[in-house]
Image (tube, rainbow, N blue to C red):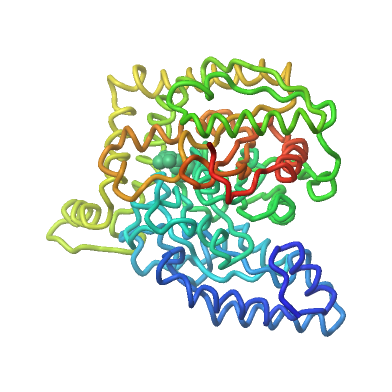
Amino acid sequence: MTLPTTATAIAAAVRAGEVSAREVVDAHLAAIEAGDASINAFNLVLADEARAAAAAVDAKVAAGEDPGPLAGVPVALKDNLCTRGVPTTCSSRILDGWRPPYDATVVERLAGAGAVAVGKTNLDEFAMGSSTENSAFGPTRNPRDPERVPGGSSGGSAAAVAAGFAPVSLGSDTGGSIRQPAALCGVIGVKPTYGLVSRYGLVAFASSLDQIGPFSTTVADSALLLEAVAGHDPLDSTSIDAPAPSLVDVLDRGVDGLRVGLVSELMGEGIAPDVAGRVRQAADALAAAGAEIGEVSVPAASYGLSAYYLIAPAEASSNLARYDGVRYGLRVDAPTTAEMNAATRTAGFGAEVKRRIMLGTYALSAGYYDAYYGKALKVRTLIVRDFEAAYERFDLLLSPTSPTTAFRFGEKVDDPLAMYLNDVCTIPTNLAGHPAMSVPFGAGADGMPVGVQLLAPALGEATMFRAAAALEAAAPPLEEAWS
Ligand code: GLN
């Protein structure tokens, strides 16, 4: 029999004993072996560990035990998620040789649910970037066109799913790093409500913004994966102490009567016409399915980008102070401790990480704190208020995920501002702590995938997933370019 390809179908077949976890994993390892030399989605492939984990799932099935809701499902993990005894690099030289002594909570929960980790995926160093070109291990290529970037920073996790190396993967999203690469690679990507998924064992970039979430080819698979990893964790003090929403069960409820607002600030200047066109088409599809569509203004969203590029670097400059040549990975020896610290950081960090540390240190320094960091926090409050007002009138909001389709290598990497502008649509939700997801909706004028973004109020995942399922059902074929 041909093997099932979605996580939902794989888990059902493995649980029923129709296929073995071992053959599913072998097929995916073979696909990685055949294809990843040209894509570079993985920093590390865990072939032996994956085969052993699959064998353990098969043994449970044979013994009549419950192998879990993700039985035998291969999953790829962004390489900023800690895996016990297994190198975790954040695609940075500075973590050379470091092996975490513990698993991230999400890694533990996936294993407990019967999923099989097949490898660690490439990213922009410490998740700073939008193209995966900032990796110390070379860029990941977009499986839909190897001349183009997969987006970032979770480019490896998006590409792994788009290339069929794994049906699902996990990434992290601080300012768009799940949703933007999902859009550029033509897959689903979800940033959950801040606090819904434990950050324990996620290497910190900007702790007040970071969230872990799934990638998949179907809405149902993201629902399944998110259900498995979500929920309270005492090891993360920001984890929400409430039951996680049920998602898989609500997908077929439709959107009849849902009020969906098109965010006007994210539909105008800077958004490519073909992308805006697809978003309007998505709004029409939701209307045809029974939703009420309106326009809504979220005025402070226009300042989101500026606020984010102060807040995120400020937090990063503090979080990355721990890489000092003593506690983790790389050490470049020098006569004094201070010189050793400096030499290690000079050699270990790439250009973008250094830029962020400098931006953040500057924004936090005495004399500039109020003007930069303090002001950015005020903007953050305004964004929260504007969203609250918008959600009084609408159940969900709709926008592009990324202003353009996938760009070519080198196009923006030397122009930080052009790169940062990529995040204009995704950043406001991180600042508010709300959930959002990207759903593929046809192709742009260049034939590359377009993602539309659904935004919801805190813990509004169930409604968001219902609308995502409706968009998935109505999505135009990727083969037809926008004209
Ligand atoms: N592209 C954004 C940045 O460079 C977002 C990164 C992320 O979400 N991790 O900061």
281 to 196, vertically: above or below: above
Expressed as whole percent of the image width and height from the top left, the position of residue 173 reads 52, 44
Q: Find residue 407 and report its image quarter.
A: top left
Instruction: Tell which residue pokes out farthest to the left in this image.
Output: 335
Expressed as whole percent of the image width and height from the top left, the position of residue 87 reads 44, 69
Figure quadrant, ligand 1: top left
Instruction: Tell which residue pokes out farthest to the front in this image.
Output: 483
Q: Name the foreground residue: 313 vs 421.
A: 421
Q: Find residue 14 and report its image quarter.
A: bottom right
Q: Name the foreground residue: 23 vs 170.
A: 23
Residue at 76%, 80% (x, y): give it: 1
Residue at 30%, 37% (x, y): give it: 416
State the count of labels.
Answer: 0
Answer with left or right where residue 386 lies relative to residue 247: left
Answer with left or right where residue 383 lies relative to residue 411: right
Answer with left or right where residue 294 lies relative to residue 327: right
Expressed as whole percent of the image width and height from the top left, the position of residue 312 reads 42, 35
Residue at 33%, 53% (x, y): give it: 323
Q: Name the foreground residue: 196 vs 283.
A: 283
Q: Name the foreground residue: 127 vs 415.
A: 415
Expressed as whole percent of the image width and height from the top left, the position of residue 230 reads 70, 50
Answer with left or right where residue 362 lies relative to residue 12: left
88 to 173, vertically: above or below: below
Q: Find residue 169 and report its image quarter.
A: bottom right
Residue at 60%, 17% (x, y): give it: 386
